[in-house]
Amino acid sequence: MADKNIELLAPAGSPEALVAAFAAGADAVYAGLPRFNARERGENFTAENMRQAIAYAHKLNRKVYITLNTLVKETELPELAEYVAQIADMAPDAVIVQDLGVLRMIREFFPTLAVHASTQMGIHNSAGVRLAERMQVKRVILERQMTWEELAALRKNTDMELEVFCNGALCCSLSGSCLFSSWLGGASGNRGKCKQPCRRRFFAREGNGFFFSTADLATLEMIPKFREMNIASIKIEGRLKQPDYVYNAVKAYRLVLDAPEITSAVIGEARQILSNTCGRRWSDGFFSEKSMKTLVRHDAVGASGTLLGRVVAVGESGFNAEIKQRLHVGDRLRVQPLSGDEGSAFTLTKLFIDRKIVSVARPGDVVYIPCDKPVAPNGLLYKIGVSHAVDMKNLENTRVRTLLPLSLRLERNALQIDIANCDALKSWRYEENWQLASKHPTCAETLAEAFSSGTADFDFVIENVALSEDACNLFIPASVLKKVRRSFDEVLSKVDPAAVGQPGATGLMKFFEFYRTQSLRPVSNQRMRETVAMRPHGATAGNPNAWKAVSILDINNATDEAILPDFCPEGKLDSLRRAIDRAYKQGIRRYRVGSLFELELLKDYKDIVITTTYPLPVANSLAAGELAAYGVQRVQAALEMEKSAIEALRDHSPLELEVYRYGRPALLTTRAILPAEGEIEDNRSNSFSIRSDKRQNLTRLYAKSVMNIPHVAGTSDYYDLTQARWNENENSTFNFESSWL
């Protein structure tokens, strides 16, 4: 029977949003620190108020997940380690990660932290979930572009905790594979700095429109399906949103989750609450092929909020606007340029009509709004929220407790507790002649539960629970376990929290010891063998000694390397497995993987060479080391990296490094049906091409310019002719000569 207790997970871009989420009924929140999270443009938490927020959540028996879901450069690893050490001492309920290097750092040096695989990892089938499980991931946050049928089929093939998005803004691109913002100035979505170019207006021969701007996701009616599929957590998007959005979105979903019966009346009431979130048009997202066809409306500005009116004049210190809907002081507003570019957002603090200060404006009024931010002439005025009173006293008065990692061992006549970081109480032993079990012996989970909550001064993390061989058939009544726990608390009350070391410091020391021992790779000036990816009947490789790579569906006698598809729905996994087996039997021993799930499909082939390729990013040596453990021999540097970042990775990588030197990579890949195809241009004269990939039922966006960067000494070269020709006129060095932000 499916688990009916679905976790309701809310965004918290600030302490106020966290308090609002819990007040509305969220079971958990996800939040970020100032660095290394996918919403670095947001307000985020300081280390100090994150500690307090976690303590506050735990006092309420709620959970906090910290986001570390961006790609990390080699030179940032020491700073990252210091961040993770702080996080380990905070004892969050999990850390959400994208970068395999971050995953490896946490698992190897900070094992008290549970890991959730971010949607940015792009996991979308059971093979990917199984690989995540082997990597000791506790929960997978699935790719958003999955249908109900694919989700149901995946669930049948895994018992892993699965999390899905249920509400909020949708990215047009497959998660983790978008280069669009980065291509237009280095502000990378994979680094938390996306400028949302997909919301802009574009121009095609057939007309202009918002060709990549998706509707918002809303799934109130789908909650019974989530229950049937035993989804562990449903997630509301919106860490850039204000507390009022968070409160209303959580309240709406809480109403439906708690309803004894989900009727049309319940859904109607929840929809009314959700309408206060001031979002975009609602949709079923990518959950159905029907929804994918209407997800993008080219004739609607991709702005979120309620349209209030239009700017009619702009001055030095404010602007005039004609109002079509009620406006009130305290409303959160955004002036949206008609281009679709991101507009200025602010809280309305003063409002004038005919030079008189007022608190309310009504339809038909022309108002003057003081504003010190840039305002687009003729821009559209949107209400994106309202001031939401949040009582912060309980959070601010919450006491932060010291973390104690406990290891429990049940023996025939005793319970032993070891504490990793407490010199004053390294171990404690409770001796008792336990009774033998007649039916249900006490298990490790029961022991862990008895010590799951902390004391007034300490917060517990259970690192390990073990039963000796002669203690596997014992029964400890609940009353006795409570007595044992009281005895432990009494001894612990005499320990000074200030004298207790924190586990993060130990992990940090171990990481730096490890990192110092990693020998730098000597840089060789000898050119290594290059690889050329081609269409089956396209251009020649150029260099006759180059490895020739083609799609696994097009291999022939001249093929040296098979390129695996970067996206494969659950229903096509068996077909891909057969294609790999055919290629292997035809003598193909080199394989190029662009998604993590493919490592699972290749794991039983022992004499092959695996190279990672875009869109599977490798930005640091820890990520390369993690991939080496799963059979990878060569990694391709993340395409967004600048020269110095590539060189730093080259110097530290345990694997041979390849650089994508020439080609036209997809800037955006989507399953949505886009309202344009062929050549398009934005209002800044940047030219692109929308092309359909009929084999994979995907649509991809390419720049007119070809990526063309110089050779980096000590690396091998990769030339991609699948979407480009040799010696094209328009070239771009992407971020190579500037910076990957």
Image (tube, rainbow, N blue to C red):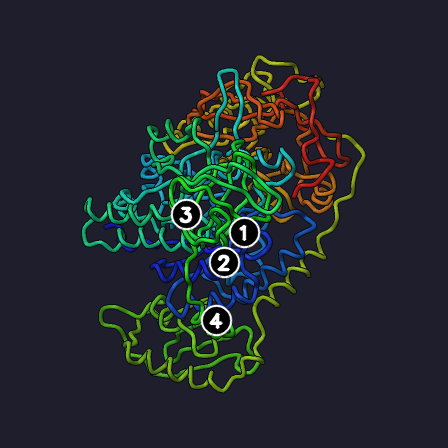
Q: Are marks 2 and 1 in contact (CB under 8 Å)?
A: yes
Residue 367 in the image, given as x and y percentages of width and height:
47, 44
User: In front here: 173 or 594?
Assistant: 173
Identify the residue shown where x is 46% and y is 85%.
Answer: 493
Q: Are marks 2 and 3 in contact (CB under 8 Å)?
A: no
| Label of residue 361 in the image | 3
Amino acid type assigned to the residue bearing label 4 in the image: Glu
Residue on which the image places disc 2: 14
In space, the residues marked 4 and 2 are separated at their CA atoms by 13 Å
Name the front one of labels 2 and 3: 3
Label 3 SS: strand
**Residue 442 appearing in the image:** yes
Residue on which the image places disc 4: 396
Name the front one of labels 3 and 4: 3
In space, the residues marked 2 and 1 are separated at their CA atoms by 8 Å
Residue 646 in the image, given as x and y percentages of width and height:
70, 40
Determine the image quadrant of residue 435.
bottom left
Which comes before the other along the chain, label 4 or label 1? 1
In space, the residues marked 3 and 4 are separated at their CA atoms by 36 Å
Identify the residue shown where x is 50% and y is 70%.
Answer: 405
In space, the residues marked 1 and 3 are separated at their CA atoms by 30 Å
Amino acid type assigned to the residue bearing label 1 in the image: Gly
Residue on which the image places disc 1: 42
Q: Give the left or right position of residue 496, taking residue 248 as reference.
A: right
Q: Give the left or right position of residue 481, taking residue 638 as reference.
A: left
Label 2 SS: loop
Neighbourhood count class around disc 2 (C-alpha, 10 Å): few under 14, some 14–19, many 20 upward: many
The C terminus sits in image quarter: top right
In space, the residues marked 2 and 3 are separated at their CA atoms by 30 Å
User: In front here: 416 or 201?
Assistant: 201
